Amino acid sequence: MFKKILIANRGEIAARIARTAHRLGVATVAVYSDADAEAAHVAAADEAVRIGPPAPAESYLRAERIIEAALATGSQAIHPGYGFLSENPDFVEAVEAAGLTFIGPSARAIRAMGLKDAAKALMEAAGVPVVPGYHGDNQDDAHLEGAADAIGYPVLIKAVAGGGGKGMRKVARAADFPAALAAARSEARGAFGNDAVLIEKYIERPRHIEVQVFGDGADAVHLYERDCSLQRRHQKVIEEAPAPGMTPEMRAAMGEAAVRAAEAIGYRGAGTVEFIVDGAGGLRPDRFWFMEMNTRLQVEHPVTEAVTGLDLVEWQLRVAAGEGLPMRQDDIPLTGHAFEARLYAEDVPAGFLPATGRLTHLAFPPGLRVDTGVRPGDAISPFYDPMIAKIVAHGPTRAVALNRLARGLEDTQVAGSVTNLAFLGRLARHAGFAAGDVDTGLIERDLAALAAAPGPAPEHLAAALLAAADPGGGALAGFSLWAPLRRSLTLSRDGDEITGAVMFEGPDLAAVEIAEATLAAHREGEGWRVGGRSPGRVLKAGGAIHVFAGAAGTFSFAPVDPLERAAAAGAGTDVIEAPMPGLVKSIAVVAGDEVTQGQPLAILEAMKMEHALAAPRAGRVAEVLAAAGAQVEAGAALIRLEEDEA
């Protein structure tokens, strides 16, 4: 076993690898950018090395700096985690050339699965079923359009070097193919430096089921399947193991196919073979097809660990250190059911836009596994994936595990950034999901209800007003019955203002006036009970008042001082602003251009995604206020339209 390893990653996965390494007596070295100097993963390691500025291209993607750090600290091996350099065969070769061990597959195996078209041909030769489609070298637009016609619509255009939904477009009609192809190529070129695509048949009722495999370079085993069908923008939201509705026959067929895939490339370490499954009419052994193989540890690996009781990072370290497979196929257990929910800093009602912010409060309930790379006080920056945590629940049955997940999400508290927490909670309580009726279109079909942002109930408003009015610290202890204390207040929430008044009728009694209603309240512990109900925990943090209302969500309010109101009005619809911090990828107009409502004017790149900014109305461009390549903050003015004289 190694004595010291370097972890070439950040965030929750780096902290998670460090935990297992320490349990095995292995010392760890973290690497960090300037943005991560005080990050949790740095604190979790025995020592840490700075590798550059915040931008990944100048730090976490600088292979030579990571290898230098490993050699300088006396590390024997490098664990890549996932993302960044984890599936870069050139990095593997550089690590090994430096006399270090790469904790993962060989460069040859990564290359074999790196391009989707070549991987599919390899899998066909190995007897693994693949989706009908075109995976050839002819990238002529007309040829690809003819291939799509031959396959039959709807089809899916996918970047051959793709991942994370980038360079992917569903096309329902032949007339839409040219525009979709151009868009997929552009996105693939920007994300991967490779605009080659493949065309596949689009499965109308698809399920995304993947199989965890593990190899020692010669033999391989599978650790059962995970269902990752709950997706938005082709990115996973909630994963589970095992897959609902799985039969012994289907599991055996998928497991055997996945093992064939791994052994065909002499796979070493942890990997995932992803299949697209036709869920119409139940799961059948002849209705699954190979999509791709991820030659690394997956984000959702904790659900496999929960149902098998095994530690996949331990297996990675042991096999990389020269051991054979730790267990035989027949000895691998499968117990109960597990779910993982990905908690992100993102604005769901605004279309899942990535968000930033400083986490003024972060708390998780007991009884769940929580993998996180942030702590209270940490900032969610625009440079990296905005994941806050992975919340994992396990139970003896699917129903019990799902109940534990739903309750755990309701009891999770986050302040300082908008999150998808309420969205995850509604998804965990979704009737179809609870029944196991899952497919990749579930979220899209019910998006309006799942992404809705209901406002606070009167008791939540009352709780916030009480917190703003209550001086605390025993200040009401000298309260006089004949001179009740009354305070009028104004709170701001998402640009709206709420006015009300609080009448303290005693140190533990109050009446709250909101609009034309009056709600009675009495102190209960450190909080207040309103109208005979508990509105949830109330917390003052970061200059705001947060009401954690369980399944209803989190409501944040800012006290308004009437003497300090901003006098200037906003720019209205004449100014196109950046909705989040990011990089201006391109500007499509110049001053004087006539634009129509909805016309794309600029592309902003943030959190590894491209976002088109459209004209809010028809008009003429007065000035362009930002240039391509500029890093801008949220709210920065990018383009101004001439005033609408109408």
Image (cartoon, rainbow, N blue to C red):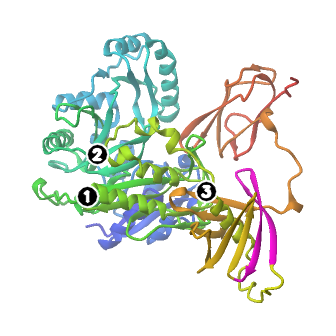
Which quadrant does the N terminus fall into? bottom left
Residue 272, labelled with which disc? 2
Instruction: Decide if residue 34 is in sight here.
Output: no
Image coordinates of residue 347 in percent, x first then y, are 59, 47
Amino acid type, label 1 = Thr
- Label 2 and label 3: CA atoms lie apart by 32 Å
Amino acid type, label 3 = Ser
Image coordinates of residue 156 in percent, x first then y, are 39, 25
Front-most of 410 and 138?
A: 410
Residue for badge 1: 397
Amino acid type, label 2 = Thr
- The residue depicted at 15 percent of the width and 31 percent of the height is 127
Front-most of 597 and 479?
A: 479
Q: Which tag, 1 or 2, sits closer to the chain's start?
A: 2
Query: Which range of residues does the magenta coloring cover?
Result: 485-507
Residue for badge 3: 417
Cβ–Cβ under 8 Å for marks 3 and 1: no
Instruction: Decide if residue 643 is in sight here.
Output: yes
Residue 132 is a magenta residue:
no
Q: Residue furthest bottom?
A: 478
Disc 3 versus disc 1: nearer the observer? 1
- The residue depicted at 34 percent of the width and 68 percent of the height is 21
Q: Secondary structure at mark 1?
A: loop
Front-most of 23 and 62?
A: 23
Q: Is residue 205 above or below residue 560?
A: above
